Image (cartoon, rainbow, N blue to C red):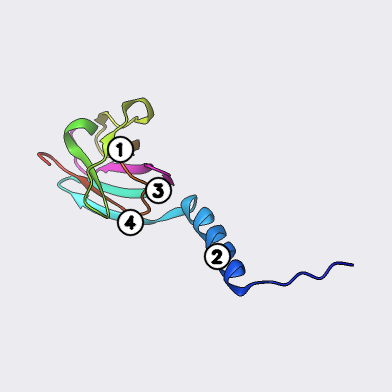
């Protein structure tokens, strides 16, 4: 029979590590904002080292088509202010939102350093 001596610091670090890993894959708090005639809801946020993947649902509240371009209308910054580079190979967020319809947007930003906080801006002319 072996007896293990637990170090409270090691237990604490282990629990925090598990919570951090679980937190990276949890659903966002369904943050919802409105930009003009478009309602935007953040559905998922996933941190992967130096990358972050975001998933939005866009709802067109008008009775006209609305075009959206990820290159022109999305920007992300880390907690330290570094600007993320849009990764086009893992991004599907361009197109037309039909009148009174929905559009699912998945994007990935790559950063120069590992991050755990991101600020995303959506809008024309950012």
Q: Magenta segment, principal secondary structure?
A: strand
The disc placed on residue 13 is 2
The stretch in magenta equals: 43-67
Question: What crowding class fits label 3: few (fewer than 14 Cα within 10 Å), some (14-19), or many (20 or more)?
Answer: many
The disc placed on residue 101 is 1
Q: Residue at x 61, y 74 (%)?
A: 8
Taking the magenta stretch, the answer to whether it contains residue 57 is yes
Please tell me which of labels 2 and 3 falls first in the chain. Answer: 2
Of badges 4 and 2, nearer the viewer stands 2
Q: Mark 4 and mark 2: span between their CA atoms? A: 30 Å
Give the percent coordinates (x, y) of residue 48: 44, 43
Please tell me which of labels 4 and 3 falls first in the chain. Answer: 4
Q: Mark 4 and mark 3: span between their CA atoms? A: 11 Å
Please tell me which of labels 4 and 2 falls first in the chain. Answer: 2
Give the percent coordinates (x, y) of residue 7: 64, 72
Q: Mark 2 and mark 3: span between their CA atoms? A: 24 Å
88 up-or-down from 110: above or below? above
For numbered disc 4, what is the local secondary structure? strand
The disc placed on residue 31 is 4
Q: Mark 2 and mark 1: span between their CA atoms? A: 46 Å
Q: Residue at x 49, y 50 (%)?
A: 25
| Nearer to me, 121 or 65 | 121
Of badges 4 and 1, nearer the viewer stands 4
Is 15 left, or right, of 36 in this rendering?
right
Taking the magenta stretch, the answer to whether it contains residue 9 is no
Q: Mark 4 and mark 1: span between their CA atoms? A: 19 Å
96 up-or-down from 100: above or below? above
Give the percent coordinates (x, y) of residue 120: 25, 48
The quarter of the image holding the C terminus is: top left
Please tell me which of labels 1 and 3 falls first in the chain. Answer: 3
């Amino acid at each position: 029979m072996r007896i293990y001596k637990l170090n409270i610091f090691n237990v604490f670090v282990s629990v925090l590590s598990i919570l951090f890993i679980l937190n990276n894959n949890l659903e966002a708090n369904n943050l919802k904002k409105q930009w003009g005639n478009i309602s935007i809801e953040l559905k998922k946020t996933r941190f992967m080292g130096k990358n972050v993947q975001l998933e939005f649902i866009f709802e067109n509240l008008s009775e006209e088509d609305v075009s959206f371009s990820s290159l022109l209308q999305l920007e992300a910054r880390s907690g330290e202010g570094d600007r993320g580079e849009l990764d086009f190979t893992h991004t599907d967020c361009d197109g037309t939102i039909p009148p009174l319809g929905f559009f699912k947007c998945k994007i990935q930003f790559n950063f120069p350093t590992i991050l755990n906080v991101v600020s995303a801006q959506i809008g024309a002319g950012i």
